[in-house]
């Protein structure tokens, strides 16, 4: 991975630095989950239709604790700051267009130990 100064000092950068500091080189592709919340099922379904892309898989479920529909968009990618930020930005615009909101992203950390 690039030098620490090359990861921007923002929320996504903080997550990536924490992963890197935990032993992840951030060079291996993995599934990254981008999460979105919708008040109504029809909004989550509309979002899933907008997101229709071969590189993305969309999963919708009802989140009882929050009484919201949770939509997770999965993308297999190398977790670079630029790609995560660009994907999150595009998906957030699409979610907001049908009444949803971004609810963060996450992925598995890959270390030398986890590859063994």
Image (tube, helix red, strand yellow):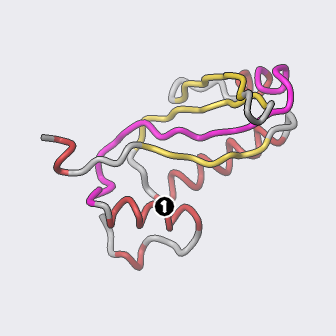
**Helix or strand or loop: what does disc 1 sit on?**
helix
Q: Position of residue 92 (x, y in %)?
A: 72, 45
Q: Position of residue 82 (x, y in %)?
A: 51, 58
The total number of labels drawn is 1
**From the viewer's perspective, is 18 left or right of 74?**
left
Residue 26 counted in the magenta span = yes
Q: Residue at x 42, y 74 (%)?
A: 6
What residue is disc 1 on?
Answer: 15
Quadrant where the image shows the C terminus:
top left
Residue density around tag 1, few if under 14, some if 14–19, many if 20 or more, within 10 Å: some
- Location of residue 51 (image quadrant): top right
Q: Position of residue 93 (x, y in %)?
A: 76, 45
Q: Which residues are magenta?
A: 23-45
Q: Residue at x 26, y 60 (%)?
A: 23
Q: Residue at x 17, y 50 (%)?
A: 112
Residue lying farthest to the bottom in this orientation = 5
Q: Position of residue 110 (x, y in %)?
A: 29, 47
């Amino acid at each position: 991975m690039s030098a620490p100064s090359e990861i921007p000092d923002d929320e996504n950068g903080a997550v990536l630095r924490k992963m890197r500091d935990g032993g992840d080189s951030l060079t291996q592709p993995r599934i990254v989950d981008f999460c979105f919340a919708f008040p109504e099922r029809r909004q989550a379904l509309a979002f899933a239709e907008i997101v229709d892309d071969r590189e993305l898989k969309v999963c919708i479920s009802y989140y009882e604790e929050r009484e919201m529909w949770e939509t997770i968009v999965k993308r297999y990618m190398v977790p670079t700051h630029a790609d995560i930020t660009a994907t999150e930005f595009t998906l957030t615009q699409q979610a907001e267009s049908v009444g949803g909101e971004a609810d963060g992203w996450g992925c598995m950390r890959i270390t030398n130990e986890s590859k063994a």
